[in-house]
Image (tube, grey):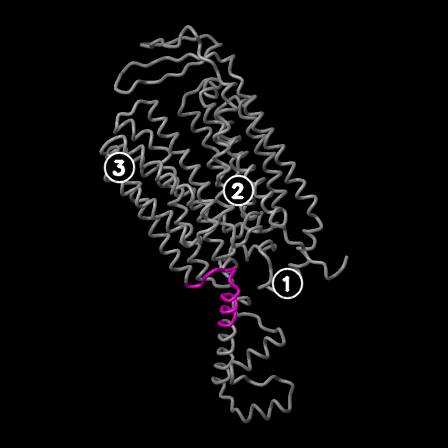
Amino acid sequence: MDSTERPKEQTTVQKVVKTILLVVVWSCIGMCLEITGPTLIDLKIRIKTDYESISTAVSGRSAGFFIGSAIGGVLVDKFGLYCDLMVAVCLDLMAVSAAAIPWVPSTELIFFVSLCGGTFEGVINIAGQKLIINMWKENSASPLHILHGGFGIGSFIIPLIANPFLAKLAPDDNNATATGNVSCDSQCGLNFTTTPGSTTTTEKRYLAETSKIEYGYAIAGLIAIVVSVVFYTYHFCGSKQRKLLKEEQDNATNHEKSDTRTLSFREMFNPATCAGGRFLYGIEIFVLVFLFFMQAVGGERVGGKFIRAFSIDYHHFSTDDGSYINTVFWIAFACGRVLGFIVAKWIPIRILILIETGGCLASSIALVFLGTSGPLALWVIMPILAVFIAPLFPSGIGWANFHIEVTGIAITVFLLGGSLGGIIYMKLIGFLYDHYGPETFLYTLLGYGIAAFVLAVLMDVVGAQHGSRFNKDNTDDTKDIEMKNEWLTEKLEEDNKGYDASESVKDNEKTDNPPSYDSYQTFKRDNVKDNEFHPTSERL
């Protein structure tokens, strides 16, 4: 092989094609993991359990996502050149996990299988985002928005796939009213709904034998497996490229190494690795973005989970209307992701994140003042809020990537912040809603809007002190500061030892020791010329 051969840069067309394929991967995640929503009644009937138990069982996905995020961060940092393979393998395993759920006989096993699926989702999430960041670098904000939009696409598609295979209502008992114990033969499953404001319970009997949801799960899994073939192809066809990248990394200096380099365990968990050797700056960015993701995910969970309950409990919506406004919220959410993809191409991420959080704050203020006045305000303002909430997650990743190198562990930290935020916000709104009434839904959203906007401002203030990591002039300024600090350190050491300038000159004439540098410019010229400059931060 020619020693001068270098890795080839991907063309724009190649980047676009791979980005579209990754959007399809996110759609597969949406299909495989959100199919439990439309099939929840069927799962309940098959296992002969209640809603509380089956809901707890499918929540294993969240616990798995937490585990997968931690594992994925280490894998991506240690084997950064194998992200395509990680995506392909985890897609297959996630597909198998999804296809197995209808055949599982107990809620405990469903929890375990869902946990496995969530774990594979976490690894895909980190590896896929790392691929986008490595491809688009400083222009990754817009692709990250459309990437996460793929999840919404899959979530919209899967109910259409699953619907033909759902259990059918028993024709003779659609509207029977239960006043005591209800018996049903082995061919039927029962589902009870309580009418608001009434003590009567409507019994809905389903024909268990008409439930064929295993076909819906199998179709979702099969689609994921087909998509995984593409990423196996990327992996095996890129062996030569990986070899060239590995050789380039081995021969590169610390400042020249790419984002795909293999990190040691010490480098993985050192914030200075992401921040160009600036430990305190790395800590600042990590803490702020971690807190930002707590708000981004927490606000999304509160808005999406409690809008239906608030509309029914406070504005007395019918159950159907409550479901409709919930659907409108998620449609607006998906539109917000697509809109974020478009505007991120033209608006700098530092400005965009202020616009998005400012929109959340303005919408939440409007909800507090108008949300209790009537249903119309809720129909109008909640979709607007959803549009501004939607792009916060990808914008957070894009903002961090603009200022620091986003490694696998960095993405893990951000996702863990989101997981923690979801847990805290759901616990908080549940307590407030039960003890102080439905209006607390609006005040929780207001608190979320204030926190998100304040954090965005703080992030921009801190980030402005150092600028973009892709700015060459900014990098050169950092190196110049580090070099000047090294010169001052050496000069101070010489002064403390009481060196006499004339004595030093005589000694230097008799030995091969380099002269002391009274002039910074002389020190800088000699070090640049000899290529011997190593920043102090790299030796720590």
Q: Residue at x 56, y 28 (%)?
A: 220
As shown in the figure, which amino acid type bears the numbered disc 3? Answer: Thr
**Mark 3 vs mark 2, CA separation in Å:** 33 Å
**Mark 3 vs mark 1, CA separation in Å:** 56 Å
Q: Residue at x 46, y 36 (%)?
A: 62
Residue 136 position in % (x across, y down): 55, 51
Residue 146 position in % (x across, y down): 50, 42
Q: Nearer the viewer, residue 104 or 380?
A: 380
Start-end of magenta stretch: 465-481
Quarter containing the N terminus: bottom right
As shown in the figure, which amino acid type bears the numbered disc 1? Answer: Ala
**Mark 2 vs mark 1, CA separation in Å:** 29 Å
Residue placed under numbered mark 2 in the picture: 125
Query: What number is the disc on residue 479?
Result: none
User: Outermost residue, top direction?
Assistant: 172
Do the CB atoms of the residues marked 3 and 2 lie less than 8 Å apart?
no
Q: Residue at x 50, y 29 (%)?
A: 157
Upstream in the sequence, badge 3 or badge 2?
2
Q: Nearer the viewer, residue 355 or 68?
A: 355
Residue placed under numbered mark 1 in the picture: 252
Residue placed under numbered mark 3 in the picture: 440
Upstream in the sequence, badge 2 or badge 1?
2
Q: Does residue 124 belong to the magenta stretch?
A: no
Q: Secondary structure at mark 2?
A: helix
Residue 458 position in % (x across, y down): 36, 56
Q: Secondary structure at mark 3?
A: helix
